[in-house]
Image (tube, helix red, strand yellow):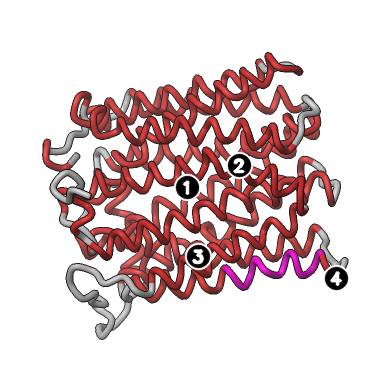
């Protein structure tokens, strides 16, 4: 393959990182659907219980997220990534084992997800900060776009495969696929060699955790463009957590559709994300960072407004697929541009704390949104809860549109 046409291929460490990411992404799409089916169909969980299960995945981000940023900024990222992947493989293996022994319960499922989330917190904090060590700065946007495209491909085919696996072998056994994927990912990541040897900055210096955390918070929220982006993103994740929780209940119970159809609708989100990620560089160059991301946020709002309009039958499935497709496009455009912008304007010694701060509060927002969605679904109804989530998504788009972030730009070479 022509490496001049595909410059990222000139960096073997990035290629290995990319392969590891792709393998674990495929497995994760299986677990994402299998956990929902296990809770709702096998364990007969209520909307509130499903919300608590979804929140457990992200609770560690609320509790320990800022500490994780400090930790990552003081340690080499590769060992953190490898250890987290191998540990997650072991943790996920508990679910099929418990099912085989007939001791699987909702509290056990929540406990496993909580431990899994803690390991994912460490992985995510290191993951986003590791990429600048693998490729030059001018390739960061295409490097993230390739990761987003890979995720989109996994999300396109993964849910359909997950639905088929769940039907053939059961949800608990299907989770073994994800456990194996994390094992493979960890082994591949262990062989990656960055452009320059990683250095643990400041590991031999006296530590002031409070000051380091304050520095990370100040950088994110006092920045005239990064601050509004982070705040709008937090509201985006509250709404996303709310709607995601209710969506599964809405599809499986209100519309009485199968897990396979649910996976099919998610596949359209993956397809949209692939298209959006492919076009993200063009949108960034054509519109600029601020307008491109704001456009993506409006697309997400429109996508969420479509969901409660869906009825039963084929027409309803079409509406759901269209909604997921549009949402996927919005995420595909947004993520690579946002990540490259955040990395481009942040000093190297603050990368871990910046990423951990934003990601942790975003995930903490899901901890709020997911149980809230379950409660609203149980007390108001599924459609009503979906309308509330869609309304919140409109609000975040308006707030970002009216902020100074609309003027955010990068140089041409950074896309």
Question: At 77% across and 53% down in the image, what residue appears?
Answer: 170
94 falls in the magenta region: yes
Circles 2 and 1, Cβ within 8 Å, touching? The answer is no
Q: CA distance from mark 4 to mark 1?
A: 36 Å
Q: Position of residue 343 (x, y in %)?
A: 24, 51
The answer to which of marks 2 and 1 sits earlier in the sequence is 2
The answer to which of marks 4 and 1 sits earlier in the sequence is 4
Drawn side of residue 280 relative to residue 31, left or right: left
Start-end of magenta stretch: 89-99
- Disc 2, SS: helix
Q: CA distance from mark 3 to mark 2?
A: 30 Å
Residue 101 — which label?
Answer: 4
Residue 157 against residue 114 in the figure, above or below: above
The answer to which of marks 3 and 1 sits earlier in the sequence is 3
Q: Mark 3, residues whose alpha carbon is within 10 Å: few (<14), some, or many (≥20)?
A: some
37 falls in the magenta region: no
The answer to which of 91 and 359 lies nearer the viewer is 91
The answer to which of 210 and 369 lies nearer the viewer is 369
Q: Which residue is mark 1?
A: 362
The answer to which of marks 4 and 3 sits earlier in the sequence is 3
The image quarter in which residue 314 lies: top right
Residue 225 against residue 288 in the figure, above or below: below
Q: Which residue is mark 2?
A: 159
Residue 391 in sight from this viewpoint: no
Q: CA distance from mark 4 to mark 3?
A: 33 Å
Drawn side of residue 229 relative to residue 5, left or right: right
The image quadrant where one finds the C terminus is top left
- Disc 4, SS: loop
Question: At 26% across and 85% down in the image, what residue appears?
Answer: 204
The image quarter in which residue 275 lies: top left
Q: CA distance from mark 4 to mark 2?
A: 27 Å
């Amino acid at each position: 393959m022509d490496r001049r046409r595909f410059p990222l291929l000139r960096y073997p460490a990035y290629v290995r990182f990319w392969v590891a990411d792709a393998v674990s992404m495929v497995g994760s799409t299986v677990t994402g659907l299998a956990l929902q089916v296990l809770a709702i169909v096998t364990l007969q969980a209520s909307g509130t219980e499903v919300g608590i299960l979804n929140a457990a995945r992200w609770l560690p981000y609320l509790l320990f997220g800022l500490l994780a940023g400090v930790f990552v900024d003081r340690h080499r990222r590769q060992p953190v990534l490898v250890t987290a992947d191998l540990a997650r493989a072991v943790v996920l293996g508990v679910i099929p084992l418990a099912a085989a022994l007939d001791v699987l319960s909702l509290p056990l499922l929540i406990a496993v997800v909580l431990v899994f989330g803690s390991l994912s917190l460490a992985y995510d904090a290191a993951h986003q900060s590791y990429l600048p060590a693998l490729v030059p700065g001018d390739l960061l946007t295409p490097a993230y776009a390739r990761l987003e495209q890979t995720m989109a491909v996994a999300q396109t085919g993964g849910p359909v495969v997950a639905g088929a696996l769940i039907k053939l072998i059961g949800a608990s056994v299907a989770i073994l696929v994800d456990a194996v994927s994390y094992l493979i990912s960890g082994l591949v990541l262990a062989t990656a060699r960055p452009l320059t040897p990683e250095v643990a900055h400041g590991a031999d210096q006296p530590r002031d955790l409070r000051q380091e955390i304050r520095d990370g918070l100040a950088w994110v929220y006092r920045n005239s463009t990064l601050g509004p982006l982070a705040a709008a993103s937090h509201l985006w994740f509250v709404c996303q957590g709310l709607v995601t929780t209710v969506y599964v209940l809405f599809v499986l119970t209100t519309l009485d559709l199968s897990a396979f159809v649910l996976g099919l609708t998610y596949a359209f989100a993956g397809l949209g994300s692939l298209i959006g990620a492919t076009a993200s560089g063009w949108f960034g160059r054509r519109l600029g960072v601020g307008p491109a991301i704001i456009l993506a946020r409006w697309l997400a709002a429109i996508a969420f407004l479509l969901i409660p309009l869906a009825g039963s039958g084929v027409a309803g499935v079409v509406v759901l697929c269209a909604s997921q497709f549009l949402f996927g496009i919005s995420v595909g455009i947004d993520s690579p541009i946002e990540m490259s912008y955040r990395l481009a304007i942040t000093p190297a010694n603050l990368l871990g704390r910046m990423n951990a701060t934003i990601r942790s509060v975003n995930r903490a927002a899901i901890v709020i949104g997911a149980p809230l969605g379950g409660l609203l679904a149980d007390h108001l109804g599924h459609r009503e809860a979906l309308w509330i989530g869609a309304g919140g998504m409109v609000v975040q788009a308006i707030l970002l549109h009216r902020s100074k972030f609309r003027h955010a730009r990068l140089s041409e070479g950074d896309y």
